Image: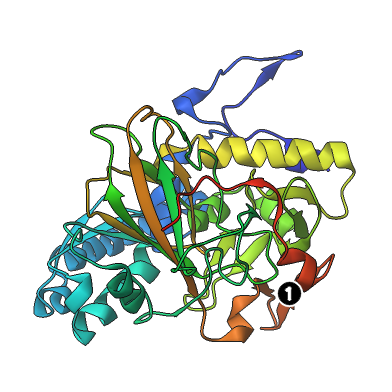
């Protein structure tokens, strides 16, 4: 147990006091931290890269070639699209697409880029009607209710004439932003694949959304932590209720990559640990996950901007710094067409899938709890 709490590298203690501060501005810093983001992109081992210069040189060549291929992305160019990466690891702006009239070739390229970059962005889509918004989403996946399989997080008696669209409208009288790191609806037994969020009205400044790379979160854990966490499950729920268990190390059904699937909004505890140890370990994991800028990108909204993200490979945070200005967002939720892939799972070394379980019932999970979602109806 001591190994999973042991700081790495230059995080040192003198007696009862840490002597390093937060070196590099983030928690759990070690001598190879500058290689972590690169190693995650290449699906390589940062420890091996640090120890073996020849191996590091091989990975460097792979990454240079990968970045060059992205810059001249032939399929995107053939489909009339141009690309602007937000960061090397996560986030890609795609220019040249009209959601209301996208071609099949563009849809295919966008899906591939989403799988690679976890979140993609479009500009200048303010002309898109709600019907066209939903129709574009259906090019990639099924669409559900406001929260996927569930209609609402909390009490919300009337979703208007477009129950598939979650209207996240904030203004001076109704300040709201999802200003907490989370993967959407992880309290559900079948959380949604992703989301397609369209800004109908953006603040003049502020109200950005941040995204964090869940692959990097997993890849860059200390080896002892990976060994301890892989195969374990955590409880998730609303209002601190335990509603479901999901694997902590989640295997992506499309890419096959591993992601760290916990978040401070809906994850309650690591199953099989003493409550105090679970709380401590989750706190240390969150400190690592959310204090590492190399894992994140930040998107500034304009009217008509769109973000499309994959809940299985990233998390997000709506920055609540825009009050008293208006911020009117509309979200369509994407559901996996393959029900076998909809429930989070972990694949072991033998290729077998391991799922979590429902702790209450699907009926209870589908029932809104007290409180109110901050939305404005049709």
Query: What is the count of numbered marks?
Result: 1
Nearer to us in this view, 39 or 269: 269
Q: Nearer the viewer, residue 90 or 204?
A: 204
**Residue that appears at 50% across and 58% down:** 215
Res 90 seen here: yes
**Residue positioned 49% across, 24% down in the render:** 23
User: Does 375 sit above or below residue 355?
Assistant: above
Residue 87, given in percent of the width and then of the height, sits at: 29, 49
Q: Is residue 66 left or right of residue 164?
A: left
114, above or below 109, in the image: above
Q: Which one is in front, 224 or 269? A: 269
Q: Residues within 10 Å of mark 1 (few under 14, many from 20)?
A: some
Residue 305 locus on image (x, y percent): 25, 54
Name the secondary structure under disc 1.
Answer: strand
Q: Is residue 87 visible?
A: no
**Picture colour scheme:** rainbow
Q: Position of residue 255 (x, y in %)?
A: 47, 75
- Would you name the residue on which mark 1 appears? 355
Question: Quadrant of the image for the N terminus?
Answer: top right
Q: Which residue is at a point 67% across and 36% down the rendered structure image?
A: 284
Residue 368, given in percent of the width and then of the height, sits at 69, 58
Q: Residue at x 56, y 31 (%)?
A: 27
Quick check: 286 above or below 247? above
Question: Against 135, is 242 above or below?
Answer: above
Q: On the rendered structure, is 154 left or right of 48?
A: right
User: Is 7 positioned to the left or the right of 255 in the image?
Assistant: right
Which corner quadrant holds the C terminus? bottom left
């Amino acid at each position: 147990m001591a190994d999973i709490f042991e700081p790495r590298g230059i995080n040192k203690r003198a007696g009862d006091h840490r002597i390093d501060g937060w070196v590099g501005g983030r928690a759990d810093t070690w001598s190879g931290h500058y290689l972590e983001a690169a190693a995650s992109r290449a699906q390589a081992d940062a420890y091996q890269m640090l120890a073996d210069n020849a191996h590091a040189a091989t990975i460097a060549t792979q990454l240079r070639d990968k970045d060059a291929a992205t810059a001249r992305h032939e399929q995107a160019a053939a489909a009339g699209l141009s690309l602007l990466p937000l960061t090397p690891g996560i986030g890609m702006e795609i220019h040249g697409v009209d959601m209301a009239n996208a071609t099949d070739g563009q849809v295919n390229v966008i899906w591939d880029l989403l799988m690679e970059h976890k979140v993609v962005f479009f500009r200048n889509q303010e002309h898109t009607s709600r019907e066209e918004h939903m129709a574009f989403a259906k090019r990639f996946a099924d669409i559900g209710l406001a929260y996927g399989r569930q209609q609402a997080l909390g009490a919300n008696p009337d979703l208007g004439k477009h129950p598939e669209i979650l209207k996240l409208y904030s203004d001076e009288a109704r300040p709201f932003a999802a200003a907490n790191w989370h993967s959407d609806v992880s309290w559900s037994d079948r959380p949604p694949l992703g989301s397609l969020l369209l800004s109908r009205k953006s603040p003049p400044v502020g109200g950005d959304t941040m995204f964090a790379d869940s692959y990097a979160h997993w890849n860059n854990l200390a080896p002892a932590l990976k060994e301890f966490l892989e195969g374990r499950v955590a409880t998730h729920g609303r209002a601190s209720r335990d509603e479901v268990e999901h694997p902590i190390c989640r295997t992506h059904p499309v890419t096959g990559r591993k992601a760290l699937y916990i978040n401070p909004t809906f994850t309650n505890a690591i199953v099989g640990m003493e409550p105090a140890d679970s709380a401590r370990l989750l706190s240390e994991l969150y400190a690592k996950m959310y204090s590492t800028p190399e894992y994140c990108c930040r998107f500034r909204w304009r009217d008509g901007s769109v973000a499309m993200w994959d809940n299985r490979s990233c998390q997000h945070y709506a920055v609540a710094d825009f009050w008293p200005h208006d911020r009117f967002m509309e979200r369509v939720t994407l559901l996996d067409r393959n029900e076998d892939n909809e429930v989070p799972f972990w694949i072991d070394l033998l290729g077998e899938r391991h799922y979590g379980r429902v702790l209450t019932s699907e009926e209870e999970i589908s029932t809104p709890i007290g409180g109110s979602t901050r939305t404005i109806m049709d």
